[in-house]
Amino acid sequence: MNTLQIFKDTCIDNILDKIEEIIEEQIRFIILRFDSKLVDAERKKIIETIKKYFDIFVILKTDVPPCKKRIEEYLSYGIHGIFFNETPSKYTEEQIDTMTFAAEIFPYNLVLAGVDDKLSIERLLDKKIIPIAPYGNKDLIKFIKNHRKFRTISSGIIKYIPIVEANQCQYTTIDKIKMKMILEAINFRQKLMVKNVEDSFNSSSL
């Protein structure tokens, strides 16, 4: 699973070219990680441009922020989901609470988190957070895929984002049509949610 690292001086054309290479490999999602020097407005612009040219799921990779308000700011970027990746992957109760909040407000509960043990997997699945094990750890990947709670989380979308395993699926024409419909539904719902977030920011003079 490759993460596209975006720095302040990264050219948007280079970003689009890299995404085009990725989707040619039958991948229909992109994971972005922004350098801390990029302000929110720059991040939003990049994501808007990506969504203008590609019908793909856009996922932000980030550490768990110290406050829930930051989750709403991430939502306002226009991303479809978040991938939390702490090192080591041991989450505090406060971090679990923040990730649970993210799973509640993002369409299709598309919130993922890196894990490296079965206890963490159980904790995340209890909160409807999708655990992501290292690709080389077949035992943990199998444990996640066979877990009954995993199959109930994002069941309508995770098949289009095969992030749990390195193997990518081959999409049929029907899959691509369904994927486009899901993306349109998410984008529409998200615009309404983002408007509510922005109205909240404005009312708070933020």
Image (cartoon, grey):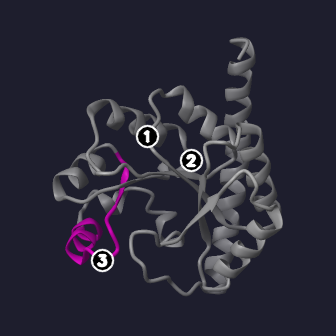
Q: Nearer the viewer, residue 82 or 108?
A: 82
Label 2 to label 3: alpha-carbon separation: 29 Å
Residue 107's label in the rendered image is 2
Instruction: Judge whether 107 appears above or below 68 on screen.
Output: below
- Which amino acid lies under the numbered mark 3 shown in the image of this protein? Gly
Secondary structure under the numbered disc 3 in the rendered image: loop
> How far apart are the two marked residues, 3 and 1, measured between alpha carbons?
24 Å
Mark 2: secondary structure:
helix
Q: Which residue is mark 3?
A: 136
Indicate whether 43 appears above or below 115. above
**Most foreground residue, 9 or 151:** 9
Label 1 element class: loop
Categorize mark 2 by other alpha carbons within 10 Å: few (<14), some (14-19), many (20+). Answer: some
For disc 1, the neighbor class at 10 Å (few under 14, some 14 to 19, many from 20) is many
Q: Is residue 144 magenta?
A: yes
Residue in the picture at 34% in, 63% down: 151
Q: Are marks 2 and 3 in contact (CB under 8 Å)?
A: no
Magenta segment, which residues?
Answer: 128-146
Q: Amino acid at mark 1?
A: Val
Q: Which label's residue is closer to the chain start, 2 or 3?
A: 2
Q: Quadrant of residue 205?
A: top right
Q: Point out residue 191 in the picture as x, y percentages from the top left corner.
A: 74, 41
In the drawing, does residue 170 fall left or right of residue 13? left
Q: Would you name the residue on which mark 1 appears?
A: 64
Q: CA distance from mark 2 to mark 1?
A: 19 Å
Q: Position of residue 5 (x, y in %)?
A: 60, 60
In front of the other: label 2 or label 3? 3
Amino acid type indicated by mark 2: Pro
As for residue 46 lying within the magenta part, the answer is no
What is the x, y in percent for residue 194? Answer: 70, 35
Q: Quadrant of residue 155?
A: bottom left
